Structure formats: C-alpha cells, structure tokens
Image (cartoon, grey):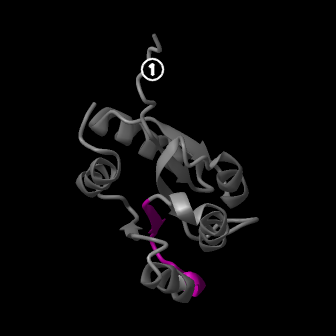
Amino acid sequence: MVVMGTPQRKKVLIVDDEPSITRALSRMIKVLSGYDSVLANNGEQGIKLFNPSEIGLLISDVQMRPIDGPSMVESLYQQYNDVWVPAYFMTANAGSFQDKVDYLITKGIVTGVIDKPVNTDYLVSLVQQALGNSQ
C-alpha cells in the first residue's frame, strides 16, 4: 500500500533589494493569510530561488541591481512558461521601466502592479486568489 503525503503548500517569492520590505511583506502574508514566503534581495537571487513546484506567487520590485524586476520576470517566464505563476510588480514609480512593465502586463506575463506603500488588504487578497483560502 502506498501512502501519499500531504501536498506541500505553495509559497510566495518576494524579490526586493530592500530587506526590510521583504521581511515586512513576508510577516504580513504569514500572519494575515498563513502562507510562507521565500525572500530574495535582487533579481539574480530571485532567478536562483524560483522553483515552480514550490512557488505559487511572485511579487517583485521593479528597480533593482544587478538584474531588474522586468528582466528577472522575463528570464523566468522564458524558462518556465509552461508552469508560470501569477506575478506582480511592486513599485512606487516604475520610472524608466514603465514601458517594459506595461509590455509584460499586456502579454499576460505579469498580472498587475502593487503600489508602494503596500495596501495590506489588497496584498492578502492577491495571496488568497493565487494560493487559495485554506490555512
């Protein structure tokens, strides 16, 4: 007889070059929706940490170095387009990246934009939509 384990709950990958932001978002998500997060401090780390069997939602800052959010998302999508997850950019101002952000949204690669400062209710709503309401 084969006993199947409980499926692992998906996590949120949060990518931002300000560690205080990634930690705060991770705490908010855990406390308010019960989901765990994987934290990356830049796009390069985000690429390394993205695992579609573990990640169910991607939230990324736009302006980062050495790899910016749009370039990271585009790279990940090229690798994982058959198992892509909802992705959101988080920014106070996309600046020179606005055209790229708009393009990725138009193509359906990015679902939308979360304004900084982050609205807690909106964030919880996105997490629950992407990962489900179960605790």
83 relative to 5, above or below: below
- The quadrant of the picture occupied by the N terminus is top left
Number of marks in the image? 1
Closer to us: 60 or 135 = 135
Closer to us: 74 or 46 = 74
Q: Position of residue 125 (x, y in %)?
A: 25, 53
| Residue farthest toward the top in the current orientation of the protein | 1
Q: Position of residue 2 (x, y in %)?
A: 47, 15
| Residue farthest toward the bottom in the current orientation of the protein | 99
Q: Residue at x 38, y 61 (%)?
A: 117
| Residue linked to disc 1 | 5
Mark 1 is surrounded, within 10 Å at the Cα level, by few (under 14), some (14 to 19) or many (20 or more) other residues, namely few
Residue 132 appears left or right of 4: left
Q: Residue at x 29, y 58 (%)?
A: 119
| Quadrant of the image occupied by residue 108 | bottom left
- The quadrant of the picture occupied by the C terminus is top left
Q: Position of residue 10 (x, y in %)?
A: 44, 40
Residue 15 appears left or right of 123: right
| Residue farthest toward the front in the current orientation of the protein | 1
Q: Residue at x 44, y 20 (%)?
A: 4
Secondary structure at badge 1 equals loop
Q: Residue at x 48, y 57 (%)?
A: 59
The amino acid marked with disc number 1 is Gly
Q: Is residue 26 magenta?
A: no
Q: Which contiguous range is marked in magenta?
A: 86-97
